[in-house]
Amino acid sequence: MADSTEAKPGVLGNQINWEKLYFYQKSDVVYQLSFAFCNRYIHLYKDRTRDQIIQAARSCKQNIVEGLADGITSTEIQLKLLNVARASLKELREDFEDYLKSRHLQFYTQGDSRYSAMVEYCRRHNKLKDYEPYFQQWDDEQMCNYALTLCHMIDKMMMTFLKRLEQQFVTEGGIKERMYKARTGYRQQQDARLKQLESEMPRLEQALAAAQSEADK
C-alpha cells in the first residue's frame, strides 16, 4: 500500500513571487521613469503621447503581475498575458525612440562612454530606489536612453522566462492535465486499498471462524 504521506499530484501550479523577478523589478522602474518623464517633458493636454507612454508602461507591469498570478490555474493565460506585457513594452520602446528621433536627440550606442556606463548600471541595478534619485536630474535624452535600455533588458529576460514556461507546459501540461493526474492518482490509491482489503478477507474470515470455534467449546 502507498504511504499516506506520499506527495499527491497537485492541481494548482506554483505561485511565482513576481516581486523577486528582475524583469518585474525593472518594469516597475520603467513605469515610474515613464511617469516622471511625461510629467517633465510631455505637455499634459497638448500631446496625446503622454497618455500612451504611461499606459504602455503600466500595461507592461500590470500584465506581468496578472499573468504570473493567473499561472496558478492556467499556463495558457499566463503565456498570453506575458506576451501582452511584451507587446506593451515594444509600444513603449517605439514611443521613446520616436521622441529622440523627432527632437534630433542622440541614441547612446556602442563606442560611446555614456552607453557603456548606462548598460552596466542597468544590468547591475533592478530596483526603483536605484533609479528614482535620477528622475529629476537626467535630461530628456538621458531618460529616453535609460528607458530604452531597460526595455531591451526586460524583453530579453521575459523571452528566457517564456521559453522556460513553454518547456514546462510541454512536459507537465496545464491544469486539465494536472486535474486528470490528481484524480487518477486518488482513484489508484483507492483501488489499491480495496485490493488490499480483499486480499485480507480470507485471513480475517479464517481467524473469525477459529475464534467462533473456540467460543463454542
Image: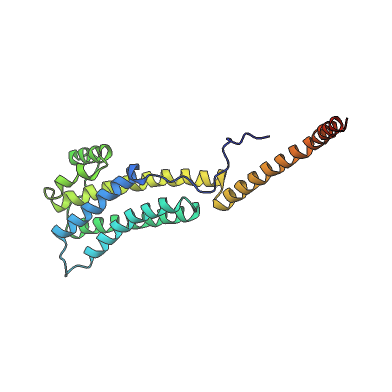
Taking the spot 26% from the left edge, 59% from the top edge, the residue there is 95
Number of numbered tags placed on the structure image = 0
| Residue positioned most to the bottom | 46
Looking at the rendering, which quadrant does residue 191 occupy? top right
Q: Nearer the viewer, residue 177 or 135?
A: 177
| Residue positioned most to the front | 217
Q: Is residue 214 left or right of residue 65?
A: right
What colour scheme has been applied to the protein in the rendered image? rainbow
Taking the spot 14% from the left edge, 45% from the top edge, the residue there is 133
Check the image and report above or below for 28 versus 6. below
Taking the spot 60% from the left edge, 46% from the top edge, the residue there is 182
Whole-percent x, y for residue 99 in the image: 21, 58
Q: Nearer the viewer, residue 152 or 154?
A: 154
Q: Nearer the viewer, residue 117 or 32?
A: 32
Whole-percent x, y for residue 211 in the image: 82, 32
Whole-percent x, y for residue 132 in the image: 18, 47
Whole-percent x, y for residue 111 in the image: 22, 39
Q: Quadrant of the N terminus?
A: top right
Q: Quadrant of the C terminus?
A: top right
Check the image and report above or below for 62 versus 125. below
